């Protein structure tokens, strides 16, 4: 049973239990006009953030192991949550270390690592090199009490106040944790320390309230969280979850007070939940993210894009279904934003080109749209747009751009149109094939056949093209990378995104 004890730290002056905070992963609330105290003690906050960053580097599959989990220490109405584990399984830890060792800068930061390394100590010592935790000893002040699981959460504020952030640190000795955390939070903030987790935030009183709320029902046992994490499969070392609808409801008052009605109306449209995990597949890094129950059906969710039909030597490519429909639906807001940025830009564009917005733009991009970059030719980029759009509109735009001094080719294809900034590249994209057959492509985009949108970057060709503008250090740190693949699938009002960073 968790002990509901708290540290002896006094509350930060002027900081109520319902503290101010904005969640970056959701629509961002503006910063309060006046400071209401520190969100969390500098030492504990820095350790938590560093732990989350390190989790990205050491992301491995071990969160499903035994022992208490951070979500078991949080109340059921938690708005957003992320967790990491620094005690991964041996095989995955080895893969993570092999991944890191490919990059010189990571080796410099972490030193010599192996599967017996204490990642907590590595993080702590690196923070001390950066000026944090001066006067503290890992062996004496941290190791005796700290566990290997960490979390960060946002819970509802008291009585309708703004959301409250919470850092969770696993504890193995509550009394030793109290003493050490008192040192770490001497400049502000407070912690409520229990037998399994210390909850740290702006004040001890606020953290005691969060702990008491969890005794009435935990996040781990809430229905939506449990279902989402079951669907997630492997947690990975870093996992996250957020109830977007409830989070944005909490943020509405902040946006309304600071910026007026428009941000509040935008927040009203946000629904559903998001969750995901960062993990390894061999020595490749993978992020699997999901969005559920948005209440907004995805435009043209049909699987399959044209990205794999590009030439084999394509450097960067992006392909998406439903772009034309999306532009048509979002045009009022896009037009407003563009007009505010440059009042006469749209009028000038339509006057000079003879095109009508948004109608001709929608006709040009169509609903199966692929962009490609194939490198440089005579110091000019080889760029192409291939779509099921209107060839007549593409020809009109090409004529205008050619009149402005650019070399632009418009070609009708069996399925639509091709617009390219080079005659030779137009022919290459029209007749070329092979990207989808390359091993680097398949490894980066394993589910491209089910995707309605995809992005691909070939790092080797990117370095070969622009390497002369990079320093030797930059080259060394990018050289181990093979490719980046981002793919998105969708059904009804659910969508999934898979990001894969592969290495050689």
Image (tube, grey):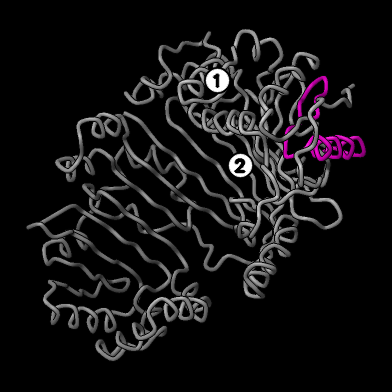
Which mark is first along the chain, 2 or 1?
1
Q: Position of residue 232 (x, y in %)?
A: 65, 39
Asked if residue 132 is positioned above or below residue 29 in the image, the reply reads above
Q: Residue furthest front?
A: 13
Picture quadrant where residue 376 is located: bottom left
Q: Nearer the viewer, residue 169 or 478?
A: 169
Farthest left residue in view = 378
Disc 1 crowd rating (10 Å Cα; few below 14, some 14-19, many 20+) is few
- Mark 1 vs mark 2, foreground winner is 1
CB under 8 Å between discs 1 and 2 = no
Q: Position of residue 128 (x, y in %)?
A: 50, 21
Q: Position of residue 443 (x, y in %)?
A: 39, 37
The label on residue 394 is none
Instruction: List the residue tagged with mark 2.
Output: 276
Residue 203 lies within the magenta run: yes
Quick check: 381 left or right of 237? left
Residue found at x 18% / y 40%: 467
Callout 2 crowding tier (Cα within 10 Å): few <14, some 14–19, many ≥20: many
Q: Which residues are magenta?
A: 192-219
């Amino acid at each position: 049973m968790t002990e509901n004890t708290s540290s002896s730290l006094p509350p930060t002056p002027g900081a109520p239990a319902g503290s101010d905070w904005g969640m970056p992963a959701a629509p961002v609330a503006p910063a309060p006009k006046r400071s209401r105290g520190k969100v969390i003690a500098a030492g504990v906050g820095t350790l938590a953030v560093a732990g989350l960053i390190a989790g990205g580097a050491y992301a491995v599959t071990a969160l499903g192991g035994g022992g208490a989990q951070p979500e078991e220490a949080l109340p059921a109405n938690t708005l957003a949550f992320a967790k990491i584990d620094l005690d991964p399984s041996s095989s995955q830890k080895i893969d993570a270390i092999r991944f890191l060792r490919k990059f010189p800068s990571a080796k410099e930061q972490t030193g010599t690592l192996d599967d017996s390394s204490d990642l907590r100590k590595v993080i702590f010592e690196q923070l001390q090199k950066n000026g944090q935790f001066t006067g503290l000893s890992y062996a004496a002040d941290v190791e005796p009490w700290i566990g290997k699981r960490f979390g960060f959460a946002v819970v509802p504020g008291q009585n309708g106040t703004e959301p409250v952030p919470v850092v969770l640190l696993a504890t193995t000795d509550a009394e030793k944790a109290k003493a050490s955390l008192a040192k770490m939070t001497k400049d502000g903030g407070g912690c409520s320390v229990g037998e399994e987790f210390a909850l740290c935030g702006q004040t001890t009183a606020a953290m005691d309230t969060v702990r008491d709320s969890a005794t009435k029902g935990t996040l781990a046992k809430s229905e939506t969280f449990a279902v989402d994490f079951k669907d997630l499969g492997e947690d990975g070392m870093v996992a996250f979850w957020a109830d977007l609808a409830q989070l944005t409801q909490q943020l509405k008052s902040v946006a309304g007070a600071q910026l007026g009605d428009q941000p509040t109306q935008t927040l009203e449209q946000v629904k559903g939940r998001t969750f995901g995990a960062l993990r390894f597949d061999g020595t490749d890094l993978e992020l699997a993210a999901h969005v559920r129950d948005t209440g907004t059906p995805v435009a043209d969710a049909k699987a399959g894009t044209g990205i794999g039909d590009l030439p084999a030597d394509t450097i960067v490519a992006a392909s998406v279904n439903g772009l034309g429909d999306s532009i048509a639906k979002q045009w009022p807001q896009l037009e407003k934003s563009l007009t505010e940025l440059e009042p006469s830009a749209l009028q000038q564009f339509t006057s000079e080109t003879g095109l009508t917005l948004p109608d001709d733009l929608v006709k040009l991009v169509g609903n199966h749209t692929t962009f490609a970059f194939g490198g440089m030719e005579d110091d000019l980029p080889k760029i192409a747009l291939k779509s099921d759009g209107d060839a007549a509109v593409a020809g009109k735009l090409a004529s205008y751009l050619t009149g402005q001094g650019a070399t632009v080719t418009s070609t009708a294809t069996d399925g639509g149109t091709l617009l390219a900034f080079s005659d030779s590249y137009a022919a290459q994209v029209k007749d070329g094939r092979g990207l989808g057959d390359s091993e680097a492509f398949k490894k980066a985009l394993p589910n491209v056949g089910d995707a309605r949108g995809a992005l691909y970057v070939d790092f080797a060709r990117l370095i070969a093209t622009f390497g002369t503008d990079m320093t030797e250090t930059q080259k060394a740190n990018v050289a181990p990378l093979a490719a980046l693949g981002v793919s998105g699938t969708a059904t009804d009002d659910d969508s999934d995104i898979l990001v894969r960073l592969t290495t050689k």
